[in-house]
Image (tube, rainbow, N blue to C red):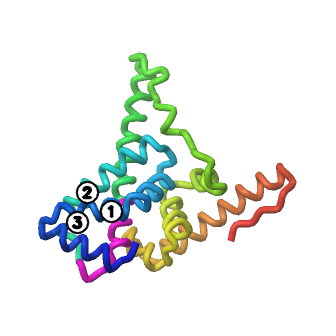
Amino acid sequence: MEERLLRAWVVRMCEGDEAAFQTLFEATRAHTYSMIYYLVGSEKEAEDVMSEVYIALFRSLPQYDSSRPFLPWFNGLIIRQVRSQKRKTWRSFRLLEKAKTVGHGGEGAIDPELEAIDHKDEILPYVKGLSHKLQEVIVLRYYQDYSLETIAEVLDLPLGTVKSRHHAALKKLRLRMGELADERGVSMYVH
């Protein structure tokens, strides 16, 4: 995805060009889906969030500053939608748990796909074991190849906080992967 073309399509979208939206969607679809999937780990949930991302994109276009790069702004929008979905899921989970304790059924009501993890990427299961805040930093850093400065901008956090989360995430990944490697008698190292 070339930044110059993305910004041109966004400008055309703001001018009411519907074909530009379709072109932008096609150009960003794979990127958007993979980023969402890395953060939620469920195909069903990723598809739900993906539709919400493009609705939010359409609604948020007036706030986009075309003098700034589009992808970091768009990735921030993706992360906000993932966070929103996680809040919705958590609220639903809490309601189901409350219904169970009160005795209103609810058994088997939790969708097993919410907890499913696809093991296609070797490190993804370890990343899913991190807190959501640490997952965001790892996905942006290693799956999107963003600098720590860009991550700070996307997440709207101080650079020191991003560095701290990055360090904590790597430490936890090293520890967990080391434990599993010891169990298997293999040498693994995350750097």
The answer for how far apart the CA atoms under marks 2 and 1 are is 8 Å
The answer for how far apart the CA atoms under marks 3 and 2 are is 16 Å
Question: Quick one: label 2 or label 1, which is nearer the N terminus?
Answer: 2
Q: Position of residue 61 (x, y in %)?
A: 20, 66
Q: Residue at x 32, y 80 (%)?
A: 4
Q: Is residue 122 left or right of residue 18?
A: right
Amino acid type indicated by mark 1: Leu
Q: Residue at x 49, y 44 (%)?
A: 42
Determine which residue is flagged by label 2. Answer: 56
Q: Residue at x 16, y 69 (%)?
A: 14
The numbered mark at residue 77 is 1
**SS of the residue under disc 3:** helix
Q: Position of residue 101 (x, y in %)?
A: 45, 22
Q: For residue 44, which quarter of the picture?
A: top left
Q: Residue at x 40, y 41 (%)?
A: 89
Magenta range is 66-79
Is 55 magenta? The answer is no
The numbered mark at residue 20 is 3
Q: Quadrant of the N terminus?
A: bottom left
